[in-house]
Image (cartoon, grey):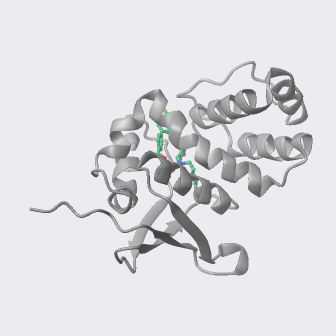
Amino acid sequence: MYGMVNKAVEAMVRSSYGDATWQTIRQQAEVSEALFVTMHQYPDDLTYRMIGAASEVLALPADEILREFGRFWTSYTAREGYRELLYLAGDHFVACLQHLDNLHARVGLSYPQLTPPAFFCTDITERSVCLHYLSERRGLAPMVVGLLHGLADLFSTAITVQQIASREMDADHDIFAITFEPHAAASA
Ligand code: 1DX
């Protein structure tokens, strides 16, 4: 994955737990780089090691770290210059979900080695949507739950997320059932 992801993991740990804890996690994960370069490619294994080490050092389940990281990612990338990209689809949470593949396609134009997941929406109602998540990477469904909460924060929408199909349970792909308050429709 691009260094931006590892930089975000580092930023999250440092801001929530401090520099000393980050150094412990960094050593435990056997990170040899003194710093991550945003646009360099790093092996996925490095990122997984950092999450695993954070889980051990902080004595928190890896799933919880991943959820926290997903939530952190949306605000981090918004700060790093990708806010407009998140809002391109409009001001509506579901519109943003439907726009995610587009967003990744645009980032991929600048960074061709991006290996983005794919998302699509089904069962859309006034107050719910099913989000399908397909990825070449394993084990990151908890991060998607955090990403969804981070997006909902950006759109000031309160959501609940329930995973209703899981690759870990032999489903073809992960599916999340999301509920939210009805979007105030723009009246003519
Ligand atoms: F719901 O792979 C909301 O490297 C969501 O299964 C989900 O393959 C927002 F400069 C710049 C760069 C860099 C910008 F090149 C990435 F470094 C990408 C910014 C997406 C904002 C995917 C990151 C692939 C790196 C992947 C979980 C889980 C997707 C991480 C979250 C908006 C992003 O992101 C999986 C890679 C960006 C960039 C966004 C992602 C790679 C997401 C979301 N992904 C790199």
Residue for point 80% across, 53% down: 62
Which residue is situated farthest in the top direction here? 34
Where is residue 178 drawn, in percent x and y? 50, 70
Nearer the observer, 154 or 115: 154
- Quarter holding the N terminus is top right
Residue for point 34% across, 74% down: 126
> Is 105 rendered above or below residue 75?
below
Nearer the observer, 53 or 13: 13
Q: Quadrant of residue 174?
A: bottom right
> Is 15 rendered above or below residue 103?
above
Residue for point 28% across, 52% down: 89
Nearer the observer, 148 or 137: 148
Tell me if 84 is positioned left or right of 28 in this view: left
> Is 152 rendered above or below residue 110?
below
Where is residue 105 drawn, in percent x and y? 36, 49
Tell me if 97 is positioned left or right of 15 in this view: left
Where is residue 173 drawn, in percent x and y? 57, 74
Where is residue 47 drawn, in percent x and y? 72, 42
- Across the whole image, how many numbered discs are drawn on residues? 0
Residue for point 43% across, 50% down: 156
- Quarter holding the C terminus is bottom left
Q: Quadrant of residue 76?
A: top right
